[in-house]
């Protein structure tokens, strides 16, 4: 039996930004607690790279196009 809920919440089964932010915060907290500040920085950097890759995939932008736009070069 399924129940449909109307109103604010995840769109099409995708978790909202609050859930993603909370999960990221918990991962960084665990890394900082158990691994120290160095592990915290590694997890933060890898999380940022993962976010960037996901953002580029969602927009349909290739890495070369993204880097060219950062450098101010237009094709």
Image: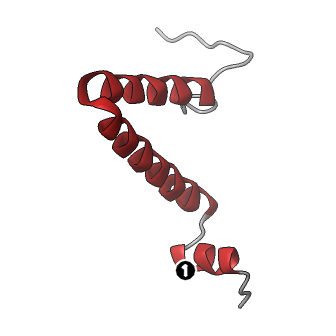
Q: Residue at x 69, y 76 (%)?
A: 69
The image shows residue 39 at horizontal and vertical percentages of 30, 38
Q: Residue at x 59, y 33 (%)?
A: 12
Q: Is residue 38 left or right of residue 25?
A: left
When the figure is inspected, residue 4 is found, relative to residue 27, above or below; the finding is above
> In the image as oriented, which residue stretches furthest toward the front?
37
In the picture, residue 23 is in which quadrant? top left
Q: Which residue does the numbered mark 1 point to in the structure image?
A: 64
Q: Is residue 4 left or right of residue 75?
A: left
Q: Residue at x 35, y 45 (%)?
A: 42
The image shows residue 50 at horizontal and vertical percentages of 44, 51
> In the image as oriented, which residue stretches furthest toward the left?
34
Q: Is residue 75 left or right of residue 1?
A: right
Q: Nearer the viewer, residue 55 or 40?
A: 40
Q: Residue at x 72, y 15 (%)?
A: 6
When the figure is inspected, residue 20 is found, relative to residue 38, above or below; the finding is above
SS at circle 1: helix
Label 1, residues with CA under 10 Å away: few <14, some 14-19, many ≥20: few
The image shows residue 66 at horizontal and vertical percentages of 61, 72
């Amino acid at each position: 039996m399924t129940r449909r809920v109307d109103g604010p919440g995840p769109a099409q089964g995708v978790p909202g930004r609050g859930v993603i932010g909370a999960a990221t915060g918990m991962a960084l907290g665990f890394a900082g607690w158990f691994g120290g500040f160095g592990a915290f920085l590694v997890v933060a950097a890898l999380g940022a790279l993962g976010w960037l890759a996901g953002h580029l995939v969602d927009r349909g932008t290739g890495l070369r196009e993204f880097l060219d736009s950062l450098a101010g070069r237009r094709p």
